[in-house]
Image (spheres, rainbow, N blue to C red):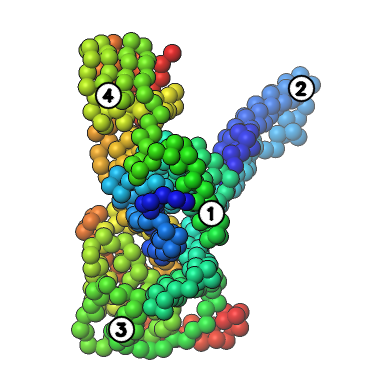
């Protein structure tokens, strides 16, 4: 973003207007006291009836003035904070667009390079097949990137088409891992053996949550075979279903544990391949957990010691979800 | 081209597909190509593979492309380097040329244009080497000797005349001195010094830099406690300057 001139900088304007307001309050009171003092003098010198003029007490006037100024001040403060937030979001979005263009340009560059090579040279069949494989992989990368953006918009505006289905969570995860084996080819993903846990889920959304958690576990990982252990727990005291994803990755620094769920936020990975991605993966995870009335948290024993992503889904709230579903079906705006 | 041995080209690119595609095309053109997937690996191959030309990406893991380039330029001014980056804005190009790149191509690029640029860069550099090129890289050290105050540094013999008499400089000290001389009057952060001077990235302690500065001051400053040439800048790093 371009450097703005100092006199239109928000902080400067904020300080200036606050100062102006405080000075004006001081002057109001000052003049009020002076005017009433001279009135007093007039009254006493012409022996008029004082009650005709001083119906209200001085302190009441001052109090009201101060209250009004306080309200204006609070208003300015709120606008100022709001402005700061917008600016922050603007910067994040800017870096996001930068990262995302890079994410789009890399597969496009690769595709273009191979297509031009094919046009220029007559390669043997097996080499052709190898590079065609690269190109297919690049188109997959492109469509994943594009989908993540489209999904983000749909999930944010709660326009996602999806039915709650009561399914076995354990089996859903196991099936998902098995059918996406090609994505995690050199990774070790283990799903705990657990008796069926039936829970209402919007399955496509839940799968999106799974892929984002798993790719993060693999991406932020320096070991030769990234490993993810998925375990289940039914916590009785607050009727929650906990699903834990424990990885052997680079871990999360304590100060990043909350930040990683922010929109466009990307964790640092010192000395590892560039982050790639767009900074929306875990934000999506959080949004999807919220749609399911659950929440998601990240824990880590520290950098280098792996991390645990815990998804907790409320067990007692089946009725609530059902009600909301009925409600959203009744309301066409909810379903787009 | 009429050389007997194939020209060696080093590709420093972190995306395996693009790197492989470049290597394929360069090999088909008769060049010998090697791939480095990170900045540090690139610097290692620059030493061992001894390329005639480097193709460099900017967004690299760990040590970024521009730091790699600056590190190379401390030792070799003449080696042709072509940046191939997704960052194609004028600002990015200017940054690249300031660091001493010879050519800049934005991704996605045209293959034919890329190959022609590579060929041209190699032809030009072979003229500059006076045709006496037999596979050795030109020792393109721009800086032979340098004097400041009462000190004289000879970069060809790695010696310096200073208040301690004639001393022998280590390779690393000489590299750091070149970096300071190249950035005379400009503040350098510890991170920059470490990345460009040593080719390190990441968690390596910046104490290393401080220790080297102490040494340089002991060599060249009349009063190492009150330095005039190698000044510390609080919470920034160091600044080299002299009248």
Q: Are marks 1 and 3 in contact (CB under 8 Å)?
A: no
Image quadrant in which you'd find residue A228: bottom left
Indicate which label's residue lies in the foreground, 4 or 3. 4
Tag 2 or tag 3, which sits nearer the N-term?
2
Q: Residue B104 or A312: which is nearer the viewer? A: B104
Q: Which mark is residue B157?
A: 4
Q: Residue A108 or B208: which is nearer the viewer? A: A108
Q: Is residue B136 above or below residue A252?
A: above
Tag 1 or tag 4, which sits nearer the N-term?
1
Secondary-structure class at tag 1:
helix
Q: Position of residue A159 (x, y in %)?
A: 55, 77
Indicate which label's residue lies in the foreground, 3 or 2. 3
Residue drawn at x 42%, y 59% as measured from the top left? B30
Q: Which mark is residue A42?
A: 2
**Residue bearing mark 3:** A178
Cα–Cα span, label 3 and label 2: 95 Å
């Amino acid at each position: 973003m371009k450097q703005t001139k100092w006199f239109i900088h928000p902080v400067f304007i904020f300080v200036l207007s606050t100062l102006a307001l405080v000075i004006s309050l001081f002057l109001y009171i000052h003049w009020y006291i002076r005017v009433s003092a001279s009135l007093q003098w007039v009254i006493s010198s012409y022996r008029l009836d004082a009650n005709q003029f001083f119906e209200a007490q001085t302190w009441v006037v001052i109090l009201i003035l101060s209250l009004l100024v306080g309200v204006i001040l609070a208003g300015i403060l709120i606008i100022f904070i709001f402005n700061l937030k917008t600016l922050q979001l603007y910067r994040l979005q800017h870096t996001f667009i930068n990262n995302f263009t890079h994410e789009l340009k890399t597969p496009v560059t690769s595709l273009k390079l191979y297509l031009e090579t094919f046009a220029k040279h007559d390669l043997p069949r097996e080499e052709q097949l190898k590079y065609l494989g690269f190109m297919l992989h690049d188109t997959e990368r492109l469509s994943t990137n594009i989908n993540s953006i489209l999904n983000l918009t749909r999930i944010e505006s709660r326009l996602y088409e999806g039915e709650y289905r009561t399914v076995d969570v354990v089996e859903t995860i196991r099936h998902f891992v098995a059918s996406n084996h090609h994505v995690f080819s050199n990774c070790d993903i283990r799903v705990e053996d657990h008796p069926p846990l039936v829970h209402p889920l919007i399955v496509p959304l839940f799968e999106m949550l799974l892929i984002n958690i798993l790719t993060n576990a693999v991406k932020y990982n320096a070991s030769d075979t990234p490993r993810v252990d998925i375990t289940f727990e039914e916590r009785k005291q607050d009727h929650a279903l906990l699903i834990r994803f424990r990885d052997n990755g680079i871990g999360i620094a304590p100060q990043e544990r909350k930040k990683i769920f922010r929109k466009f936020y990307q964790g640092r990975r010192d000395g590892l391949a560039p982050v790639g991605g767009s900074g929306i993966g875990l934000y999506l995870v959080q949004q999807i957990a919220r749609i399911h009335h659950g929440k998601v948290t990240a824990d880590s024993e520290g950098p280098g010691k792996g991390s645990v992503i815990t998804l907790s889904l409320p067990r007692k709230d089946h009725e609530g979800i059902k009600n909301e579903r009925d409600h959203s079906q009744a309301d066409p705006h909810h379903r787009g | 081209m009429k050389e007997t041995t194939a020209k060696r080209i080093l590709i420093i690119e972190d995306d395996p597909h693009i790197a492989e595609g470049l290597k394929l095309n360069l090999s088909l053109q008769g060049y010998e190509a090697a791939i480095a997937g990170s900045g540090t690996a690139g610097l290692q191959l620059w030493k061992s593979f001894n390329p005639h030309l480097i193709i460099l990406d900017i967004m690299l893991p760990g040590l970024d492309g521009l730091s790699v380039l600056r590190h190379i330029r401390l030792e070799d001014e003449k080696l042709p380097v072509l940046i191939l980056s997704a960052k194609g804005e004028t600002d990015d190009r200017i940054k690249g040329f300031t660091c001493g790149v010879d050519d800049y191509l934005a991704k996605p690029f045209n293959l034919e244009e890329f190959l022609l640029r590579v060929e041209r860069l190699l032809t030009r550099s072979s003229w500059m080497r006076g045709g006496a090129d037999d596979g050795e890289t030109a020792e393109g050290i721009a800086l032979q000797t340098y004097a400041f105050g009462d000190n004289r540094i000879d970069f060809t013999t790695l010696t310096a005349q200073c208040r301690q008499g004639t001393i022998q400089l280590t390779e690393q000290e000489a590299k750091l001195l070149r970096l300071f001389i190249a950035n005379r009057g400009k503040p350098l952060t510890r991170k920059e010094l470490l990345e460009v001077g040593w080719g390190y990235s990441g968690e390596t302690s910046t104490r290393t830099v401080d220790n080297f500065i102490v040494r340089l001051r002991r060599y060249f400053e009349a009063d190492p406690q009150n330095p005039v040439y190698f000044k510390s800048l609080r919470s920034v790093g160091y600044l080299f300057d002299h009248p």
